[in-house]
Image (cartoon, helix red, strand yellow):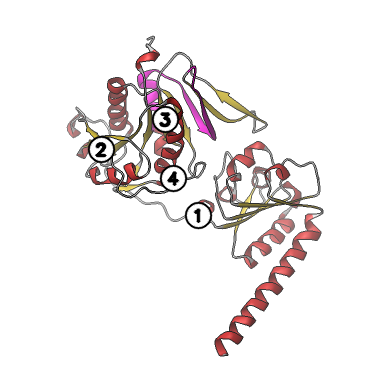
Amino acid sequence: MKVNIDDYRGVWVFIEQKEEQLLDVGLELLAAGRDLADKLDVELCGVLLGDGVSHLTKEVFESGADKVYLIDNPVLKYYRTETYMKAVGDLVRKFKPEIFLYGATSNGKDLASAVATDVLCGLTADTTLMDVDVEKRLFEASRPAFGGNIMATILCKKHRPQMATVRPKVIKRLPLQAGRTGEVIVEEIDVKEDDLQTKVLKIVKDAKKAVNLEEATVIVAAGKGIKDEKGFAMVKELADILNATVGASRDVVEAGICGHDHQVGQTGATVTPKVYIAIGISGAIQHIVGMQNSELIVAINNDKEAPIFNAAHYGVVGDAFTIVPMLTEAFKEALSDKVAQEEVTTNG
């Protein structure tokens, strides 16, 4: 069905919550939404669903939203495609946003695709860069394509809303503005528990992942240039000295040198550590989009033309098998001296 796109205005963000706690990704997306809304001169709105979640609107406003659409109902206590699609679809049809952003979490991706099917609009998955053509009011959602070799910008010219999922940690949250408020629009969902086909019988929590790249402050990452398990062990030794987390490129994971939970990039984790040391990583777009927001990037590669150097703050051109052991020894000495100095000061 053809829609009148001129009827659609505003930027929306799905504010995901779990057990009455807001997930960071929705608050991160408010930063991106704020930029888009300001360029289009429209309101930035959060969409908050759940049971007993009305108190969470405070943090949504303090994170940049002008308005929150709230549906607080027991049938929304747990995420189910059936109920959340109905709630969001009804909101979209009634209030007509022009742009709608979701976190690329398991629930966010499921919901976004279901809503796109329900309201008949497009959806760009795993977006990493966002902008807007103000004159044409077109949302420009960019993501790696063709195995990460190019960046594709996807437009939705004839349907609204223009929707995208965005991975956690791609956007940096805005500083909280304490006391900032806005308008809460309370809506209802016309669904009863007895009418639902899906029932939540039990919630089983996953065990904590052995590797938590998303929360790491220092990451030492291995690329194809480390060659084999011996090279990976060399990278891990440096990481251990720095009390860092070990990351890896897709090539290393696909070679079976380490598990997928170490992978950084479009098909792995998106990370924002204080320090990211890339060892033997060439710098394909697929990898760059997963770590480009790190505060400090150090690259070690024997190819001076490697794309990774374009993203790095510091680069070392040379053989990793020579440079990394030297760095490991230097850090060992520096940390040993620091410990000795602290002991002298303490025993003073």
**Closer-to-camera residue (168/202):** 168
Classed neighbour count for the residue bearing mark 2: other residues with Cα under 10 Å, few (<14), some (14–19), many (≥20): many
Residue on which the image places disc 1 = 215
On the question of residue 227 being in view, the answer is no
Residue 234 is inside the magenta segment: no
Q: Which residue corresponds to the image point at 64% horizontal and 46% vertical from the top-left?
A: 253
Q: Amino acid at mark 4?
A: Leu
Local SS, label 2: helix
Q: Amino acid at mark 1?
A: Glu
- Find the magenta span and give its range: 111-136
C-alpha span from label 3 to label 4 = 14 Å
**Closer-to-camera residue (120/25):** 25
C-alpha span from label 4 to label 2 = 28 Å
Rendered image: mark on residue 37:
3
> Cβ–Cβ below 8 Å for labels 1 and 3?
no
Q: Quadrant of the C terminus?
A: bottom right
Local SS, label 1: helix
Is residue 62 depicted above or below 132 in this figure?
below
C-alpha span from label 1 to label 2 = 29 Å
Rendered image: mark on residue 174:
4
> Cβ–Cβ below 8 Å for labels 3 and 4?
no
Rendered image: mark on residue 76:
2
Local SS, label 3: helix
Asked if residue 34 lies left or right of residue 289, the reply is left
Q: Amino acid at mark 3?
A: Ala
> Which of pointers 2 and 3 indicates the residue nearer the eye?
3
> Which of pointers 4 and 2 indicates the residue nearer the eye?
4
Q: Amino acid at mark 2?
A: Leu
